[in-house]
Amino acid sequence: MSSTTAQPTLDPRDRGGPAQPLLIVDELTKHFPVYGGALNRQVATVHAVDGVSLSVRKGETLGIVGESGCGKSTTARLLMQLIKPDSGRLIFDGDEVGAPGGIDVTSMRRQMQMVFQDSYSSLNPRMTMIDSIAYAPRMHGLSAKAAEARAESLLERVGLHPRQFGRRYPHELSGGQRQRVNIARALALEPRLVILDEAVSALDKSVEAQVLNLLADLKEQFNLTYLFISHDLNVVEFISDRVLVMYLGQVVETGPVEDIYSRPRHPYTRALLASIPTLDPDRRTTVLPLTGDPPNPINPPLGCRFRTRCPFAEAGCAETTPKLAAPIGTQANPVTPHLVACHVAAAQQGAIHGH
Amino acid sequence: MATEAAVDVRNLTAMFRRREGDMAAVNGATFSLARGEVMTILGESGSGKSVTLKAMMGLLPDYASITGEVRVAGRDILKLPPAALAKARGGELSMIFQEPMAALDPVYTIGEQIAETIVKHEGITYASAMQRALALLERVAIPSAARRLKNYPHEMSGGMRQRAMIALALACNPTVLLADEPTTALDVTVQIQILLLLRELQQELGMSVIFVTHDVGVAAEISDRIAVMYAGRFVETGTVREIMRHPKHPYSKGLLNSTVLGGLRGRRLETIPGSPPSLSALPRGCAFSPRCAQADVRCLTTQPDETVLGPGTIVRCFHANTAMAEAI
Amino acid sequence: MSQFQAIGSIGVPSPPPIVAIPASPGYWRSVWGRLQRDPVTVAVGILLLTIFFVTAFAPLVATQDPTTGSVIGRLQPIGSAGHWLGTDETGRDMWARLAYGGRLSLLTGVAPVTISLLIGGILGITAGYAGGLVGTLIMRTMDVFYAFPSILLAIAICGMLGSGLFNSVLALALVFIPPMVRISETVTSQCRHLDFVEAARASGTTTSQIIRHHMLANVLGPILVYATSLISLSIILSAGLSFLGLGVTPPAAEWGLMLNSLRQSIYVQPYVAALPGLMIFVTSMCFNLTADGLRSAMDVRLAH
């Protein structure tokens, strides 16, 4: 692991070869029942994640962006198997997770780790930094001494001096320092895929930039693949190679970051991008990109879920749910396709807002 | 009237008395705001930006001691007797918060809360106050306002609640609106709606707005002037264009530089090393000196004074002049 | 983005000197350290220890027999010769009776709480961690007990089982189990949903490892604090049971029982009659203050 050669093929754990996506997610679905009433019966269903498919290539950063209630965080927890999906398949480096002949959840989790948004609650308040980082390797059979040595070297890698910070408790560190520890902890099992769920969202802006730089360094050093989940469109554009836009539990658009940000095809993606504050006081936003709030994922609209806020909506949008496909009038790039889930050609071509 | 300023704040200081010693969350904030002007206080967590607003509203707990002057329409708010302060609060001086759910009372409908505020301040009948409440909800563009009047806060979506809180704040025609990160908890598509609404209302009603945020983009969208706050002090104030294009204080520069933009893809972000200091353990000299590349011995030992560069434009840095030369 | 190009770059100043933090003494030892630095807790602790030792070594500190009275020496005032705390209505030495009585009172304070801590704690942590059907079953069962006020429940159980020390301890333990379950369930389910538990699950930690390493240390603190505060309630309730004749049976000495039998003498010797009540008050107060001290010592955020 100490070798920092950036050649994915040298990783002995690479089973499928460089062309095999590290993670393939097929039609992942999770509905949460809502209980209520006098007898506590199920009264509604939250369609948290509805038929989400995606693939993460080795060595890339896939960004997932969307507003609250779009299901991006639920997707992360489903991938980690922290909650059980209702249906859908996970294929990790060519092996189906939990299937006969595939890999089991435990071996998948060793190769896939997660960093949470809240840096404080993701650390055990009763454990020192070294103990927190060394914990998982010890549970997996590393000796106490070796686990501690690994924790110290990881602390060093994330920019915290082990002698200064190793014996401290979470409340003695700043938010940025704690998040560095969380990253170190996620790396302790030497994972290949790291899911970053709003990992920099709660940090101060000046600290956010430091952590983003750190993530870029670690990706290179440890030959990592990232799944970066955020509501911050600027950060997602900065860090991602490909982007997935989610709305109410479904993927509405996906493609290379340049395509999504310069030629968004879904009216929702366009509205999202147009909502970014401009940073230029002479070119302020004057036209409302979108009215209303995102609807509740309890009983979402039938057909296309965006149609209730979409200026291009037609009668057909209420009838069938659009599938992800190449934009009308284009040919999909077979390697990194730009796909959009929208029926209406005019909506896909709509006036493109700069940002 | 000698002065045209809608708000005039002189040397506002909020000290928290604590066992380990006093802690100045706001240290000598001085600014004035013309009618119809929007000033943003930009700062990171713990910079004292929210405390400044709460001190102006007299909303800080008893163990905080507040000194200085906050003049609204010529009257010093801090010297008002409690009854008059209560009248001014929600009257000429009004505030909106980050979490409308916490600021609105969960057991009354939106209509009842707005009407009650109007009755309390103006003594008109409840029925006509309710009429005004309806007009206010329409004014903040809440769809089917008559129905929404009878909604409880929890029955509304986040953006709708924020609009309802703005309506409540506008109930008694304030001349000054204090906005404490009102868009931070909102989704980006809703945030821009609220920003546009606030800008529109502010221009139409001629209100002065003091807007607090940590988000440089939001500040650029809404403000006429920006005050950058660090460790309890205004380190730089100026017009939005000055601050966004030619920031003079090293902290303002660092903050702008570390703002993540998609266009910086593949490059390393410029960062300010370290993290903001704790207010209870401030460095001896300039509070920013431990993180500043330009810091010299003077910065480490003495607190820089404000350098006035023009009306409403100040910078608190020994190196401001050299930095200015560099920027040109 | 041309407007940003002109901005001068921010370099990196020299890093602050590295201060090595000595190896941490471990959580429980640091709690102990903080307890020792709290003057109120130390004072209360010394007082509790004194009460404990006096009652434990009652035969040594009180030379007179607590059950032998004297008809002529009844209701002597405080400070009388041979009985420095006076005598009760049958002429028994108050000092001896208070010292011996404390044994039973402390026992009826600590024993029911310990029993309920064990049973209720296990049930509550199970309900909180498992959730779902198991959790609902446990919690709804506890709700049935909640329907009765605790003192009534204790009286009812004691009435069923008959009076006596053992039965009153058992009754009080049963009374304390439901609140103990509820508090353990609440803190456990709160802790269970924190990200660090999820993170541990995500790195393949087994359920029993999570409970032992991540949950217990975070959950035991609040539960112990609550249990400590229940001790004072238990002393008062058991005094109440003895007062009603349902707890300890005469002639054994117990503070609640003494309060009951001295009741008639309140106009003759008010100070002597108040002594058992004072002891109940002081002891339960001490346990309450200990609980407060423990609470702040266990809060890592208040450290230093």
Image (cartoon, coloured by chain):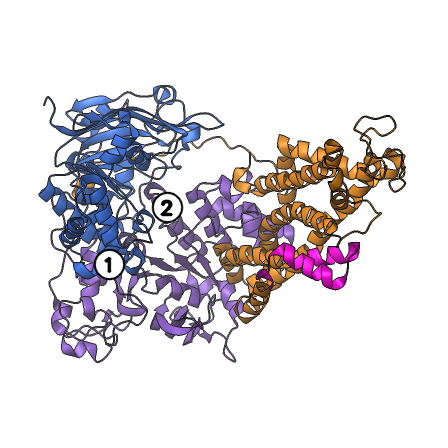
Chain colours: A purple, B blue, C orange
Q: Position of residue C163 (x, y in %)?
A: 77, 57
Q: Are marks 2 and 1 in contact (CB under 8 Å)?
A: no
Q: Is residue A291 visible?
A: no
The answer for which chain carries disc 1 is B
Q: Which residues are drawn in magenta? A: C145-174
Q: Main secondary structure of the magenta part?
A: helix
**Above or below, B47 relative to A27:** above
Quick one: SS at disc 2? loop
**Above or below, B203 relative to A224:** above
Q: Is residue A42 visible?
A: yes
Q: Is residue C157 magenta?
A: yes
Q: Amino acid at mark 2?
A: Leu
Q: Which of C250/C118 is in front?
A: C250
The residue that mark 1 highlights is B150
Q: Which of A5/B288 is in front?
A: B288
Q: Residue drawn 20% across and 22% down?
A: B308
- From the viewer's perspective, tell me whether residue B144 is left or right of residue A59: left
